[in-house]
Amino acid sequence: MYNTFFLCLDGKSHGRFYAPNQKGEATISDLCQFIIQADRYCDFLETPQSATVMRSFRQRGRGEKTQEMDIIQTPSPGNVRGKVATFVIKVMFRNHSSWQGSIYWVEKKHTINFRSVLELIHIIDDAVQARNRRQMKDGV
């Protein structure tokens, strides 16, 4: 089982993201915030299962769940778009303290598989940089 997230970038790294059955949208100020919130959402749903237990400075009780999350229907994927770029991210596995899955760039209709969160960040950054280079070349 995997989770799908819709990441709508309205700037270089800020924007909104949607998750299946999550209440509305979550605004993000950077990609790190998206990754942390999406990972907590995966923990809450227990899918995909994490292969490792995350360490923390805060002591957690055994079997303690993450905070409750509101669950309702999200908008259809056709209605969510970022001003800069829109991505559909499928997190298929959470092994080696990271994510593995695929990312679909909506505007370019192109899919790339990723093997880690760091690789995912590089793919997103490369897409945003490519868009910016095209705009500068076109004089927009």
Image: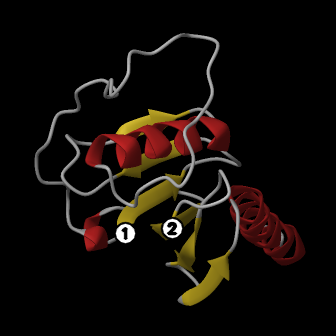
Residue at (31% x, 28% y) in the render: 65
Residue 118 is marked as none
- Residue 13 image point, x, y percent: 67, 45
Residue at (55% x, 77% y) in the render: 102
Q: Disc 2 marks which residue?
A: 93
Q: Amino acid at mark 2?
A: Phe
Q: Image quarter for residue 99?
A: bottom right
- Residue 85 image point, x, y percent: 57, 64
Q: Amino acid at mark 1?
A: Tyr
Q: Please give left or right for residue 60 compared with residue 103 in the image.
A: left
Residue at (29% x, 70% y) in the render: 77
Residue at (76% x, 65% y) in the render: 119
Callout 2: few (<14), some (14-19), or many (20+) C-alpha neighbours within 10 Å? Answer: many
83, 69: nearer the viewer = 69
Which color scheme does this rendered protein use?
secondary structure
Element on which disc 2 rests: strand
- Would you say residue 81 is visible in this rendering? no
Q: CA distance from mark 2 to mark 1?
A: 7 Å
> Where is 125 relative to 105, above or below?
above
Location of the N terminus by quadrant is: bottom left
